[in-house]
Image (cartoon, grey):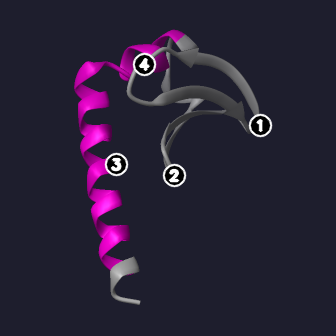
Amino acid sequence: MRVIAEIPNSQCRISILTMNQKFIVKIEKGNYEQTYKVSEMDLFFGLEDVKKMVNETFIVKVLERFKQMDQDFSEELSSI
C-alpha cells in the first residue's frame, strides 16, 4: 500500500492510497478510521476522479458516521 495523495481538511485526515489496482480513500479522525475502495478500472481520470468524489457533501456524511461510530463504541464500553 502506498500513499499517493493527501486531501487537506481541518476536521479529519484524508489520504489516498493505491494497492492491487484499487484506490483506497482512508479517512481518520481521533481513534476512528473509514476506508473506501474504488477499482482503478471504474475511473476514467484516475486520481483526479477520486479527488472529485471526496467533496464537501461526502465529507459531511463521513463526519456524521464518525459521530455515530463514537456513540456506538461509547455505549458498548459503558456496558462492560
Q: Does dot 4 land on a helix, a strand or a loop?
A: loop
Question: Tag 2: Cα neighbours inside 10 Å, few (<14), some, or many (≥20)?
Answer: few
Instruction: Give the class, few, some or many, for how many residues have Cα within 10 Å of label 4's Cα (few <14, many ≥20).
Output: few
- Identify the residue under disc 1: 1
The CA distance from mark 4 to mark 1 is: 22 Å
The stretch drawn in magenta includes residue 61: yes
Which disc, if any, is residue 32?
none
Q: Which residue is mark 3?
A: 66
Which segment did they paint magenta? 48-76
Identify which amino acid the numbered label 4 is placed on: Asn
Picture coordinates of residue 63 (x, y %)?
A: 30, 39
- Asked if residue 68 shows in the view, the reply is yes
Q: Position of residue 8 (x, y in %)?
A: 48, 14
Q: What is the distance, in whole Å, between disc 4 and disc 2 at their CAs?
A: 17 Å
Taking the magenta stretch, the answer to whether it contains residue 68 is: yes
Residue 23 image-quadrant placement? top right
The answer to which of marks 3 and 4 sits earlier in the sequence is 4
Q: What residue is at 26 percent from the left and 57 percent from the top?
A: 68
Q: Earlier in the sequence, mark 1 or mark 2?
A: 1
Q: Which mark is residue 31?
A: 2
* Residue shown at 34% from the left, 59% from the top: 69
Work out which quarter of the rendered image holds the C terminus and state it: bottom left
In the image, what residue type sits under mark 1?
Answer: Met
Sequence-first tag of 3 and 2:
2
Q: Residue furthest bottom?
A: 80
Give the mark, 4 or 2, whose residue is nearer the N terminus: 4
